[in-house]
Amino acid sequence: LEAGHAALVVSGKHVGSLTKIIEVIPSTMKRKKAVTLEEKDGKRFQTTAESIFVVGKEKPAIELKGAKD
């Protein structure tokens, strides 16, 4: 779970999107670890780290049929 790695969103509004991790935001006593992600079209959003699955370093190491790019 590091900036620059490829991630698949597994829950929430962007489920199924293949994204790039831009920033990892540490957890606190009141907030879960979060990540800032970027989609291929350049749009960025944040979600909790438990809502993503890292699938590769610079690019996805797997191919998902039907995944949103």
Image (cartoon, helix red, strand yellow):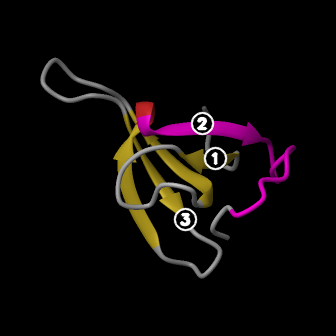
Q: Amino acid at mark 1?
A: Ala
Locate the C terminus by quadrant: bottom right
The tag earlier along the polypeptide, 1 or 3, is 1
- Against 30, is 63 above or below? below
Residue indicated by mark 2: 53
Judging from the image, what secondary structure is the residue with disc 2 in? strand
**CB atoms at circles 2 and 1 under 8 Å apart?**
yes
Q: Does residue 31 appear left or right of residue 42 in this picture?
A: left
Q: Earlier in the sequence, mark 2 or mark 3?
A: 3
Q: Secondary structure at mark 1?
A: strand
Q: Nearer the viewer, residue 12 or 20?
A: 12
- Residue designated by label 1: 7
Instruction: Give the residue furthest to the left.
Output: 30
User: Where residue 50 appears, x then y in whole percent?
Assistant: 43, 30
Residue numbers of the magenta segment: 51-66
Left or right: 11, with 61 as reference point: left
Nearer mark to the viewer, of 1 and 3: 1
Which residue is the site of mark 3? 38
Tell me whether circle 1 and circle 3 mark residues in contact (CB < 8 Å).
Answer: no
Residue 34 relative to residue 38: left or right: left
Residue at image coords 52%, 40%: 52
Q: Amino acid at mark 2?
A: Phe
Q: Residue at x 30, y 26 (%)?
A: 27
Q: CA distance from mark 1 to mark 3?
A: 10 Å
Q: Quadrant of the N terminus?
A: top right
Front-most of residues 68 and 20: 68
Q: Position of residue 66 (x, y in %)?
A: 70, 64
- Report how far apart the C-alphas of labels 2 and 3 lie in the structure: 14 Å
Dominant secondary structure (helix, strand or loop) of the stretch shown in magenta: loop
